[in-house]
């Protein structure tokens, strides 16, 4: 039985090689960006170049489908191209949507955290600006305008709060499930350097997001 | 008891299904606001009295004297009183904010599910500020999407094969469909876009075949 | 509350997992002649009758639905291989290696390519059994690889669907351990409590300051 399992895993590693060979397609990269964005508690860097390229490919494919339809090409081929197009469009839309939802949820936190603010695209920044106006107006009309003067802030509980203590922020010590497609070796779990875990290729791990944050941000590990 | 109504408000929020909106509880909400105003009415005089005693204390300090025992006791009592009102106010504020903020989240997610116009049965559950918020937020979303030139309110779930297998039940003849022109002769079996086939199916001119 | 909704948002829906699985490659034997497809997700074909070629599962299923190919079930889906896996799965505490999307892939093929799978009833029931056995040992088959200060868990050979199922439970349990073991737990326990009950606020309680 042991040998059987061994044989199987070598088979998979061949598949993995093949996978990594084709993993350079933008469709694959977009899929990973989508998965990471969905699973990370915090907003990640906007994949500007990737989104740009994906949109170009989508447009090209839309033109191709149109042209094939016009000149009466084989309907089967057209429908297969259309399905490929639909899949890519779904990924792109869902990726952008996931980001918007995070922006809406943590707008006040992103607003005061330059590092996060810089992760947004221009249109996202504009969108967030408007979201903040909308929300401030709503909170003000519903609650804050009716409270005593030193309790009117939506960021602080009262004017005696030293820091913003009413801003919802993502919990970075939340656990995520992640996988690396290559061996990363001993990896430090916390700042003390006392705790390390071995991260093997293709194994799943449940780890605090905080500890693998840099690996996610540099694309060395993927969230699933 | 201070803060009880505020916590009722939050409990109401917590007991509803995630994403589901119950009617905005105007009465309870107004009562909590009223409680906040009440706290301020207590807080103001207390703080003024505390400041008065503190002034006396400062003057006494300059003369190397201490506050009278009775003044010390009053100061302590007023401080505690002010603290109770302040903390109760904070608690109520947090309850009010949590109520509005969490409902706003649910209102935003409605924006994805429906097309910019709220159905009546939902609209009547919202406060006037919430209705305005829904409109404003939908407009913000819309302007983001038009800047991108991409509609994000479609494709909410992964796509499936957009084509379905149908059998033509009556002679329909040659038609131009969204992606092909086809001869829809009786008994013909072909793959059409679901969107093209749907109105023929609803008229009974076609049937969908499975498998 | 905030933690809860986070966990929900990060979980993939069943449809999304299936979408991901549909990108896995599978071998088909076409019965038509078709030029290579230059898709956004990659180049596939050319397609020649009786010449096996690899395509993503969604493409294989689309061709199969239109009667244009036979799908070759992957090696691991044979009765022989699955019987071995099932036995090993029962004997060992650890999870046996299976493709990450074995649940979704097998379901897609059962739905769309039943005539291409030899002994389909046997295969289907073996996979059901394997799923069951694996599910019941989720408690024992996960390996704690660190528990000094930070808990870490290795989910070796867990599949996508299984990971998705255990995600809320495992992450919540680990978060609790993490909080209990954190050195500032004692003085911070108050605010941890607050955090769980209040959505908007997450700061520690503040004393009224003297003015």
Image: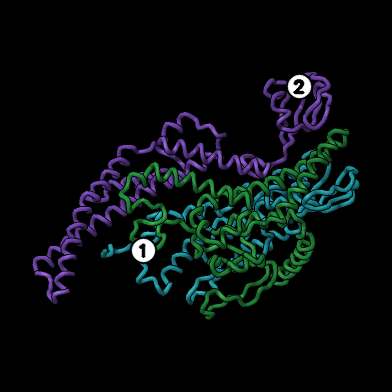
Chain colours: A green, B purple, C cyan
Describe residue C206's horizontal placement relative to residue A79 as left or right. left
- Left or right: A122 with respect to C192? right
Residue annotated with mark 1: C204
Q: Quadrant of residue A159?
A: bottom left
Vertical position of residue C106 compared to residue A179: above or below = above
Q: Which mark is residue B169?
A: 2
Is A118 situated left or right of B86 in this image? right
Badge 2 marks a residue whose secondary structure is loop
Q: Is residue B207 visible?
A: yes
x and y percentages locating residue B91 in the rendered image: 31, 53
- Secondary element under disc 1, as helix, strand or loop, is loop
Q: Please tell me which residue is depicted at 77% across the width and 24% down the height of the picture.
A: B168
The answer to whether mark 1 and mark 2 are in CB contact below 8 A is no
Crowding near the residue tagged with mark 2, few <14, some 14–19, many ≥20 C-alpha atoms within 10 Å: some
Left or right? Give the position of B158 relative to B31.
right
Q: Nearer the viewer, mark 1 or mark 2?
A: 1
Q: Position of residue A183 (x, y in %)?
A: 68, 73
Nearer to us in this view, C90 or A54: A54
Residue at screen point 72% across, 26% down: B207
Q: Residues within 10 Å of mark 1 (few under 14, many from 20)?
A: some
B51 or A81, which is in the foreground?
A: B51
Q: Which quadrant holds residue B145? A: top right
Name the spot of residue A36 as percent of width and height, x first.
62, 58
Task: Give the CA distance from mark 1 to mark 2.
Answer: 71 Å
Nearest the camera: B56 or C28? B56
The answer as to whether the residues below labels 1 and 2 share one chain is no
Question: Can residue C131 be seen in this snapshot?
Answer: no
Question: Which chain is mark 2 on?
Answer: B
Q: Position of residue C170 (x, y in %)?
A: 51, 62
């Amino acid at each position: 039985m042991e040998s059987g399992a061994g044989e199987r895993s070598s088979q998979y590693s061949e598949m993995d090689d093949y996978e990594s060979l084709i993993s350079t397609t933008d469709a694959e990269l977009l899929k990973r960006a989508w998965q990471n964005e969905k699973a990370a508690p915090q907003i990640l860097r906007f994949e500007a170049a990737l989104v740009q390229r994906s949109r170009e490919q989508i447009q090209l494919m839309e033109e191709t489908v149109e042209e094939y339809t016009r000149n009466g090409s084989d309907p089967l081929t057209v429908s297969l191209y259309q399905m490929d197009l639909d899949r890519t469009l779904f990924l792109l839309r869902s990726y952008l949507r996931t980001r918007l939802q995070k922006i809406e949820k943590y707008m006040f936190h992103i607003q005061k955290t330059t590092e996060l603010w810089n992760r947004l695209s221009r249109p996202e920044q504009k969108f967030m600006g408007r979201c903040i106006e909308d929300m401030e107006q709503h909170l003000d009309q519903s609650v804050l305008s009716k409270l005593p003067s030193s309790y009117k802030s939506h960021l602080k509980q009262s004017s005696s709060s030293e820091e913003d203590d009413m801003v919802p922020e993502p919990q970075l010590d939340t656990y995520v499930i992640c996988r690396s497609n290559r061996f990363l070796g001993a990896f430090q779990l916390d700042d003390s350097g006392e705790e390390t875990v071995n991260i093997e290729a293709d194994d799943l791990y449940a780890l605090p997001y905080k500890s693998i944050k840099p690996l996610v941000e540099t694309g060395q590990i993927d969230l699933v | 008891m201070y803060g009880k109504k505020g916590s009722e408000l939050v409990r109401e929020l917590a007991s509803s299904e995630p994403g589901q909106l119950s009617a905005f509880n105007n009465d309870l909400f107004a009562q909590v606001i009223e409680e906040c105003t009440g706290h301020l009415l207590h807080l103001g005089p207390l703080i003024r009295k505390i400041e008065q005693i503190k002034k006396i204390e400062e003057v006494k300090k300059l003369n190397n004297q201490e506050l009278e025992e009775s003044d010390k006791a009053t100061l302590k009592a007023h401080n505690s009183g002010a603290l109770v009102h302040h903390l109760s106010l904070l608690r109520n504020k947090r309850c009010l904010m949590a109520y509005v903020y969490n409902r706003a989240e649910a209102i935003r997610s409605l924006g994805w599910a429906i097309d910019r116009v709220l159905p009546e049965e939902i609209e009547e559950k919202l406060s006037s500020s919430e209705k305005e918020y829904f409109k404003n937020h939908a407009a913000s979303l819309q302007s983001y999407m038009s800047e991108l030139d991409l509609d994000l309110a479609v494709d909410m779930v992964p796509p499936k094969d957009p084509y379905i297998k149908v059998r033509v039940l009556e002679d329909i003849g040659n038609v131009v469909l969204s992606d092909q022109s086809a001869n829809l002769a009786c008994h013909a079996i072909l793959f059409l876009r679901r969107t093209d086939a749907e109105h023929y199916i609803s008229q009974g001119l076609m049937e969908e075949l499975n498998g | 509350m905030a933690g809860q909704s986070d966990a929900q948002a990060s979980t993939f829906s069943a449809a999304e997992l299936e979408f991901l699985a549909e990108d896995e490659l599978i071998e088909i034997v076409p019965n038509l002649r078709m030029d290579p497809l230059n898709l956004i997700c990659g180049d596939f074909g050319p397609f020649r009758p009786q010449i096996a070629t690899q395509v993503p599962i969604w493409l294989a299923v689309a061709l199969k639905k239109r009667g244009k190919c036979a799908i070759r079930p992957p090696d691991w889906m044979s009765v022989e291989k699955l019987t071995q896996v099932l036995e090993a799965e029962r004997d060992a505490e650890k999870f046996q290696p299976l493709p990450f999307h074995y649940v979704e892939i097998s379901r897609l093929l059962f739905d769309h390519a039943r005539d291409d799978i030899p002994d389909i009833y046997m295969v289907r029931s073996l996979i059901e059994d394997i799923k069951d056995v694996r599910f019941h040992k989720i408690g024992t088959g996960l390996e704690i690889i660190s528990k000094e200060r930070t808990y870490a868990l290795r989910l070796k050979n867990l599949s996508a669907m299984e990971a998705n199922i255990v995600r809320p439970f495992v992450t919540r349990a680990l978060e609790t351990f993490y909080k209990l073991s954190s050195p500032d737990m004692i003085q911070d326990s108050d605010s941890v409590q607050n955090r769980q009950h209040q959505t908007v606020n997450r700061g520690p309680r503040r004393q009224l300051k003297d003015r």
